[in-house]
Image (spheres, rainbow, N blue to C red):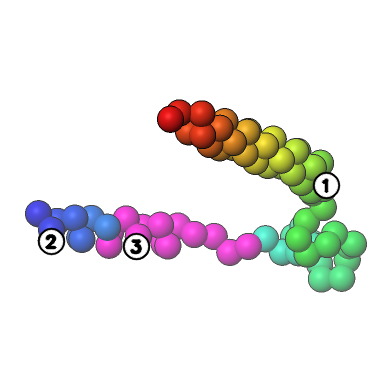
Amino acid sequence: MKKLVLTLAFIATALTFSIAQNPPHPNGGGAPGGGNTPVGGGAPIGGGLIIMAIMAIGYGSKKTFQLNKVKNLKKQQP
């Protein structure tokens, strides 16, 4: 059974690497130096970072509130 699992894992890994593609040309496939597209692409990330930061602050606040609530309940019990 162990040999079968290892064989299947090897085959899955080999198939994954065999269908991998090269990254696209930085200029969108055009001639080198023919455009002004940055290497990383032109997608804005500012809005996503703000949303992620707000969600992280909310999650941290929730966890802190729950932890304080549990500590206060333990203090009240004799």
Marks 3 and 2, the one that precedes in the sequence: 2
Q: Is residue 61 visible?
A: yes
Disc 2 packing (10 Å; few <14; some 14–19; many ≥20):
few
Q: CA distance from mark 1 to mark 3?
A: 37 Å
- Tag 2: residue type? Lys
Please, what secondary structure does the residue beneath circle 2 have? helix
Residue at 63 percent across and 33 percent down: it is 65
Disc 3 packing (10 Å; few <14; some 14–19; many ≥20):
few
Q: CA distance from mark 1 to mark 2?
A: 48 Å
Residue at 90 percent across and 62 percent down: it is 36
Our reading of the magenta stretch's main secondary structure is helix
Residue 55 picture quarter: top right
Report x, y in % for residue 5: 19, 55
- Tag 1: residue type? Gly
Please, what secondary structure does the residue beneath circle 3 have? helix
Q: Nearer the viewer, residue 64 or 70?
A: 70
In the image, which residues are magenta? Answer: 10-23
| Residue hosting label 2 | 3
Q: Is residue 38 left or right of residue 67?
A: right
Report x, y in % for residue 23: 63, 62
Q: CA distance from mark 3 to mark 2?
A: 16 Å
Residue 11 picture quarter: bottom left
| Residue hosting label 1 | 46
- Tag 3: residue type? Ala
Q: Nearer the viewer, residue 16 or 43?
A: 43
| Residue hosting label 3 | 14
Residue at 9 percent across and 54 percent down: it is 1
Magenta span contains residue 71:
no
Marks 1 and 3, the one that precedes in the sequence: 3
